[in-house]
Image (tube, rainbow, N blue to C red):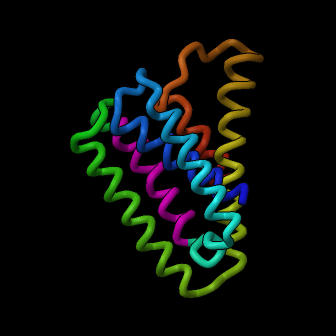
Amino acid sequence: MFTGALLGYIWGWIWGWSLFDPNSDVWALAAAICALLGLLLGALAGLRRNATSLLCATIGLLLSWYLRTLLFGDVPGGWGAALMLAGSAAGLALGIRLQRRGSDRLLRALLWALYAGFFGGFLIDVLLLDLALGVVKEHSILSQAPWVIACGVG
């Protein structure tokens, strides 16, 4: 259930941020709604049989969101959204292919990457670099995403 809520939160946050003005806080509403939908999906056990595909699609979404911001800036919609859609689709296609193998080790590794990336990125960027050391004054996709990716890979 918690994994479903976290996946929903991530999808709602990223798409809400990428399709609407980030200052309008629509991303926060989208993240909350999608988190509740993910929680419901997880509670109904609909997540387990497609977990590998959903986790790979989420990784594709995150990486393409970062690439979109590098290439096009933090501008809602446009070609950046198309790039993110392609990244999500590529991750999903890879996930479907990997899911056919039915590897529990792969699923555990993907779950580890999800949780380590999400919480590790928060710990490093917000708690350590911002609150403890005062090095980071502004949080952005370009400053936070590398920590999330590093923690997820680590």
Magenta stretch, overall SS? helix
**Residue drawn at the location 35% of the way across and 27% of the way down:** 21
As rendered, which of 40 and 94 lies closer to the eye?
40
As rendered, which of 47 and 100 lies closer to the eye?
47
Left-right relation of 148 to 115: left
**Residue drawn at the location 70% of the way across and 32% of the way down:** 124
Relative image position of residue 66 (x, y in whole percent):
43, 42
Quadrant of res 125: top right
Relative image position of residue 132 (x, y in whole percent):
77, 17
Does the segment drawn in magenta span residue 56?
yes
Q: In this picture, is 4 found above or below 106?
A: above
**Residue drawn at the location 58% of the way across and 46% of the way down:** 9
Q: In this picture, is 139 found above or below 72?
A: above
Quadrant of res 133: top right
Q: Which span is picked out in magenta?
A: 53-70
Left-right relation of 154 to 24: right
Left-right relation of 43 to 83: right
Does the segment drawn in magenta span residue 78?
no
**Residue drawn at the location 65% of the way across and 44% of the way down:** 118
